[in-house]
Amino acid sequence: MNDILNTIKEAVINRKRKEIEGLVDDAIEAGIEPGLIINKGLIEAMDVVGEQFSADDIFVPEMLASALAMKLGLAKIKPFLKSGDQPSMGTVLMGTVRGDMHDIGKNIVNMMLEGAGFTVVDLGVDLTVENLMEEIENLKPDILGLSALLTITLPEMERAVREIGDKGLRKNMKIMVGGAPVRKAFAEEIGADGHGADAVEAVDLAKRLIGK
Amino acid sequence: MKSTSYNLIMSALYKGMKGERPPVGNPTSIVCHGLMDLCGISFPEAHLEPQAMAELALAGHEILGFDTVMPEYSVDQEAAALGCKVDWGDRNRMPDSRHFPYEDFSNVKIPDDFLEKPSIRVVLDALSILRRHVGGKAAIIGKVMGPWTLSYHMAGTQNFLLQIGIEEKEKVHRMIRQLMPATVASARAQFQAGADIVVLADHATGNLVSPRHYEEFLLPIHQELTNTIEGPLILHVCGNCTDRLEMFADAGFDGYHFEWQVDAKTAVEKIGHRMCLVGNVNNPEVLYQGTPEDVYNQVRYAIKAGVDIIGPECAIPLSTPIENLKAIVSAAHEGY
């Protein structure tokens, strides 16, 4: 069994998107629990990919290709999952602030959060504070993740954090921020609950913020 | 040498004589709300009308005291001319495009009237206006997007980078090569319209792709570009590019505009003898959130390190306090 799971893990790490679905089929046919395929195959692989990314051993193109392999694998497993097989760690609402169309970093964080067992609702890019507040009220997430890539959109991030707080929406929700120009000092100054320098830090932070 | 704005910039670009003080330049936008208010011109007009575009650029020289004028504030001029639907934004928001005409990596068609498309024409006309106003007095900088950045616009950044990750190399090489003539045409036209220098922005940034990717996909293309475009070119690539600085010099650019993540001393040590260095005052923490004193300290650090032309690292946040921009100029006016 471990051999099959290791092969799946290696296939994700090495971006073998064409092989992954066949490998997952093999694992299911061999009677391996779907939850185990996810945890020991796909998630462990993305942990390795995340570490490689943090260490600059790989860059965004390779990360995206591994994430694609993981997604293809997950899609194959999903029909076999029973409810309760994978309890959610919590709900994270993710989005890029107003004026900023950049979403790669956010998308990578989404993939890693999903990999870690969070339910992620991605609101997309260029979000007004009003959009964000409406979705927070609807979905009541545990965490709001805000992203900005452009230094020119940092003021929007500051405004979003402030206005969401003024509206009293932070009582049961934490806010984490990230993006290339976002530093820890900036995150503290605008009053966010935490800052992740990369996708791996963001997942650790999300776990800490919800106390897990 | 007379220490005029034009002379200081051009001499620094070619690493020639030093004047009374280091020059202050902006290869990317220095437009903020304060500057818009002082000259009475705002976005989006300054992206769309040549007179407004030129006047806002002039304000950077006449009001703030920068030694350059640079009239292109967006990164979307070529993209719009190549068929992207661009939202030109407003006073508080920079333009951006929301659809990608070559998502399927089909053959890119550069329109025959590319240089006559409104988004290209406006820049050329603004450069000509600037030439008439400050030619020979301030250095006039044009700006074009390189084929890597244009590929982001044409295919979508994530889609483009994914193709590299899944080793669809032929697709990637083909798209870059097909877009190269747009960069060449735009740069040549900007020189003919009045630019003294053109900034070529190509975002193979340190945070996105590796030096290996740059070397494989882009270095040969950049070498062709610098061989083909006759006028002086400053390369702009964001992010921490410490690991690929030598390759930028190998590509044949005359200058490199860099961010604060690349330490000024390191940059000078690695490539300062091969190309002009422009930068690298931090935007988020210093220009946007810091004080004039923070700006002063960074400028003096860069000058001491040997950076040739001092300026912000990249396009500044629109709500940057104008005092912080003026602090760049006053710190440089203290001399070497």
Image (tube, coloured by chain):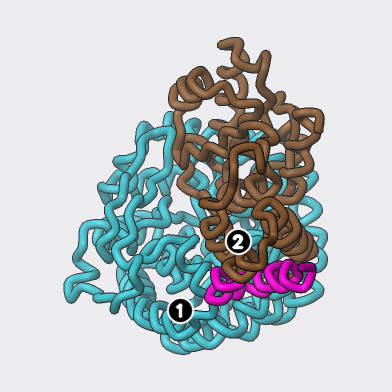
**Protein chain holding label 2:** A
Which chain gets the cyan colouring? B
Residue at 39% from the left image edge and 33% from the top image edge: B91
Residue at 78% from the left image edge and 76% from the top image edge: B270
Which chain gets the brown colouring? A
10 Å neighbourhood of mark 2: few (<14), some, or many (≥20)? many
**Protein chain holding label 1:** B
Query: Can you identify the residue that label 2 sits on?
Result: A70
Query: Can you identify the residue that label 1 sits on?
Result: B172
10 Å neighbourhood of mark 1: few (<14), some, or many (≥20)? some
Locate the C terminus of chain A by quadrant.
Answer: top right
The quarter holding residue A86 reads top right
Compared across the picture, whether B7 is left or right of B102 comes to: right
Locate the N terminus of chain A by quadrant.
Answer: bottom right
Compared across the picture, whether B83 is left or right of A139 comes to: left
Q: Which residues are magenta?
A: A1-23
For the stretch drawn in magenta, the main secondary structure is helix
